[in-house]
Image (spheres, helix red, strand yellow):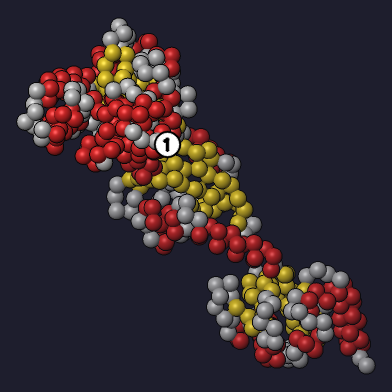
Amino acid sequence: MSQDVLTTETNRRQLQQIIAGLSDGVILLELDQTILWANDAALAMHGVSRIDALGANASEYAKRFALRYRNNHPVPTENYPISRVARGETFSDVLVEVTPASDEEHTWVHNVRSMVLADSAGDPESLVLIMDDVTEWASAEQRFEKTFNANPAPAVICRLSDLRYIKVNGGFLEMTGYARDQVIGSSAYELDVLQGAENIQLAKQRLREGTTIPQMQAELQLPEGGSKQVIVAGQPLELNDEACMLFSFVDMEPRHKAEVALRQSEERFAKAFRLTPVPILVCGASEQVVMDVNEAFLDTFAYPSEEVLGKTIAEIDFIHEKGARTRLFAALEKSASLDRVDVRMRKKDTELIDCAVSADTVNIQDNPCYLLVLMDITERKRTELELVSAIEEVMKDASWFSRTLIEKLANVKSVNSPKLPNVSFTDLTARERDVLGLICEGLADKEIAARLKLAPNTVRNHVATVYSKLDVHSRSEAIVWARERGLFSGDWRAKGQR
């Protein structure tokens, strides 16, 4: 064996010993494309344990492993790194995805470079492929890419070395109307995302330093002319080992429109609240503290505003009937609204007025509140009572009236009262009318039983039926029901039978 051959073999053994323990994968090829040797790292990066699993040469390697570029395009066989180095090419930083043809579930990402070893005469002697396993880095980058593109918040990434945009997501394109190729590759001078920033000097300084740019309002120029008000912020990051700045944006236009709409709505409500001639009160739902009242309330109830605002309904104590306030707010808490409930109120000067209360639950600054509308119906009530008195006077001597006509006249007063049940005296049986009449005379159940010659239990059953039909709960309520309808004001039995 010649000295040159021995020297070559010695050099190769020494080279193999040096690179065998490297974390980088190394594959040695002969000039005829034969795969001569590979270290353990290179075998692991291909998912094999023996060198013959790589194939005998570059052609067999191409059959056993499918390579794709990072853009998912397949690598032509002639452009496989092992084929290129076999042609004597030198290259670096070629990123490829490597998938075994026999196991498509596993894929590695290699960053490959080549080296051509020359002999003492300078002629090519061995070919070397050196590869780094960057699968984890590529997976993280892919996750970042998916997250960045899927993020609905508009964003762009600017490379700090030349201030050029290298990434843009759909949110930014949709917000501005730019096309992707109008952004990618353009510089921060051509598309200035910090233009009109409220603290432009600080923003520019932080961009030069590559440090965080705090949120600030800015004016973003649009491709078709005009501009858009945005909130912009910058966050430094590294991408592909390069210092970059991630700019994210918030479109102020929807918020501005919502604020304008809210302000206009509040203005309309405030104007209607102040100018309506009907007393209105707003109080908190939990403690019933009065938050606001209109002028009509102050005028009607004769209170100065300082004695109402900030006070609870209980402290003001303008609801006359005992227990009415508790029942009113209990009903509101249960049903969230009320419609024309008759409540007697008291002015500051102790004068009593009748009010029809309507109420609803509203949210003010995310707090539940009650809006109470208090319609003064005192005059209407007085008119109704006068009408009832007139009807009663007529009915005292109106023997020629039929009972049905008398009831229709008596019921005139209840037309506008939503609280009165829609029940007629004629809905009661003859015996139930007798029982109601004797109740109105003030007789107890035993006395009624004696008068009508009925058993006490039978009378109690008739009384319960009368209560149910009239929707009342006591003798006094039954008497009021009858009096409001002008019944039993005289010898009605005699009149009704004539």
Residue found farthest to the left: 400
Q: Residue at x 26, y 16 (%)?
A: 353
The answer to which of 228 and 414 lies nearer the viewer is 414
Total labels: the figure holds: 1
User: What is the quadrant of residue 116 in the picture?
Assistant: bottom right
Q: Is residue 149 left or right of residue 459?
A: right
Instruction: Provide residue 254's location: percent of width, then percent of height.
Output: 36, 45
Q: Is residue 292 left or right of residue 385?
A: right
The answer to which of 489 and 66 lies nearer the viewer is 489
User: Element type at marker 1?
Assistant: helix
Q: Is residue 237 left or right of residue 13?
A: left
Which amino acid, by three-letter code, is at mark 1? Asn
Q: Quadrant of the C terminus?
A: top left
User: What is the quadrant of residue 50 in the picture?
Assistant: bottom right
The answer to which of 140 and 32 lies nearer the viewer is 140
Instruction: Provide residue 60's location: percent of width, then percent of height.
Output: 70, 91
Residue found farthest to the top: 349
Within-10-Å neighbours for mark 1: few <14, some 14–19, many 20+: few
Q: Look at the picture and state if 238 lies above or below 88.
A: above
Q: Residue at x 69, y 68 (%)?
A: 135
The answer to which of 483 and 72 lies nearer the viewer is 483
User: What is the quadrant of residue 289 in the picture?
Assistant: top left
Q: Residue at x 44, y 45 (%)?
A: 250
- Kindly identify which residue carries mark 1: 457
Instruction: Provide residue 111's location: percent of width, then percent of height.
Output: 68, 70
Q: Residue at x 78, y 70 (%)?
A: 24
Q: Look at the picture and state if 329 lies above or below 334.
A: above
Q: Quadrant of the N terminus?
A: bottom right
Instruction: Provide residue 218's location: percent of width, then percent of height.
Output: 41, 40
**Residue 402 visible somewhere in the drawing:** yes
**Residue 269 visible somewhere in the drawing:** no
